[in-house]
Image (spheres, helix red, strand yellow):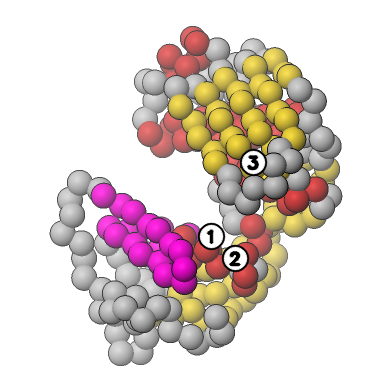
Amino acid sequence: MTAGTTVGKRQPIRKLMLIAAAWMISAVHLLGGQQASEKARATPKLPDTTTELAAFEVASIKPNRSGMSGSQLNFHEGRLSATNVRMKTLVQYTYEIEAPQIQGGPNWLAQDRFDIEAKMDDATAQQAKTLSHDQVTRFDRQLVKQLLAERFKLVVHFETKELPVYDLVVDKSGPKLAVTSVKDGGTSISSGHGNLTAKCVTMTRLTQSLTQVLSGELGRVVIDKTEIEG
């Protein structure tokens, strides 16, 4: 996709365009890492703040040499199950950033794949059930963050720098989007074969999905500049 190219051909999307830009965004520098051993144990603690790290009680990490391209990452009732995942993908999930924002580190972080099974202790899992959805998501990310630090010896630091990005902007003729009539959620985004379908989403959520879909080919983050709300 080149700068100024209209995104898509269907009416709901054709008035939104990606344009090349430069933007000061946060980038994560990976300072180190090493391959994982088979098991780890730690005493988990339900965090009281967003800066306090929790830890899995038990974790098993094994290299995946199946040659498969797909991967899965799931949390369910205090358990993490990840299949054929790259460490770089885990960093993206943990720090809520996109691939172009991750810089440095050894090549295997983006190449080698792993199978991970980890669980928190039963008492902590029960406590986690009392948290809100956002709190649970933050807690899950803290667990993975601690896992990366303990098992992969991951060290990171943040800095702000100018990187090439794409701005999502409205065509000069104005937006043609209608606010959804759905009142109970129903958000969904799917992509494949050159198409992207989004239902009941904000522009912020759409740009995140565009980044995920396009960053592999374009190597850039997509920034919402539409000023469209709802």
Give whichever of 206, 116 is nearer the camera: 116
* Type of the residue with mark 2: Ser
Residue beneath disc 3: 84
* Callout 3: SS: strand
Q: Which residue is mark 2?
A: 215
- Part of the protein shown in magenta: 186-208
User: Which sits earlier in the primary sequence, circle 2 or circle 3?
Assistant: 3
Viewer-side label of 2, 3: 3
Sort mark 3 into few (<14), some (14-19) or many (20+) by Cα contacts within 10 Å: many
Q: Picture coordinates of residue 92 (x, y %)? A: 61, 48
- Residue 64, given in percent of the width and then of the height, sits at 71, 38
Compared across the picture, whether 158 is left or right of 22 comes to: right
Secondary structure of the residue carrying tag 2 is helix
Count of marks, rendered view: 3
Which residue corresponds to the image point at 47% horizontal and 35% vertical from the top-left?
A: 137
Q: Can you give x and y, in whole percent of width and height, for residue 212 in the image?
A: 53, 60
- Residue occupied by mark 1: 212
Marker disc for residue 95: none
Task: Specify the quadrant that holds the C terminus.
Answer: bottom left
Q: Quadrant of the N terminus?
A: bottom right
Residue 156 appears in the rendering: no
Q: Secondary structure at mark 1?
A: helix
Residue 77 figure quarter: top left
Q: Nearer the viewer, residue 15 or 36?
A: 36
